[in-house]
Image (spheres, rainbow, N blue to C red):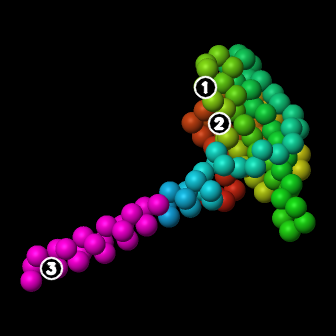
Amino acid sequence: MKRKLKIILLVVGVPITLSVVLLGILVYTFFISMESLPKGEFLTEESSPDGKYTLKAYVTNGGATTSYAIRGELVFNEKNEETKNIYWNYREEVAEISWVDNDTVIINNRTLNVPKEKYDFRFH
């Protein structure tokens, strides 16, 4: 009897576990990760005082049913790293960017310490 129970748990449990893990990966990739945000149209850019970073801002138009949004992309000028989305805010059409110092940027009145911090309206 114990052997049958183990086989049933294996046959049923493994596919269910794999399905839940796969679903979690898909939800994260397409709905939570900032790396899958829409590209948008380029608005403006500002470089940090030391030239180490550039923050580029893009406006995205979700169509007739959603408002505009601003995506901020951090470019690493000295390193050969991929760009990183650090700002995503809904119901904005303009981007005002100013650098406080070499590692602190203000975009639309939100202060971020780069490259560690990011702002995503979905989680604030």
Q: Is residue 124 above or below residue 98?
A: below
Give yes or no for contact between labels 2 and 1 (Cβ–Cβ under 8 Å): yes
What is the magenta range? Answer: 1-22
**N-term mark: 3 or 1:** 3
Q: Residue beneath label 3, please?
A: 4
Q: Residue beneath label 2, please?
A: 84
Q: Residues within 10 Å of mark 2 (few under 14, many from 20)?
A: some
The residues tagged by marks 3 and 1 sit, at their Cα atoms, a distance apart of 53 Å
**N-term mark: 2 or 3:** 3
Determine the residue positioned at 28% across, 72% down.
Answer: 11
* 97 to the left or right of 124: right
The amino acid on which the numbered mark 1 sits, given as a three-letter code, is: Glu
Determine the residue positioned at 66% across, 32% down.
Answer: 83
The image quadrant that residue 105 belongs to is top right
Q: Residue beneath label 1, please?
A: 81
Task: State whether the magenta stretch is mostly helix, strand or loop.
Answer: helix
Q: Position of residue 113 (x, y in %)?
A: 62, 35
The residues tagged by marks 2 and 3 sit, at their Cα atoms, a distance apart of 51 Å
How many labels were placed on the picture? 3
Q: Position of residue 23 (x, y in %)?
A: 50, 64
Q: Secondary structure at mark 1?
A: loop
Q: Quadrant of the N terminus?
A: bottom left
Q: Position of residue 63 (x, y in %)?
A: 88, 61
Residue in front for this viewpoint, 19 or 77: 19
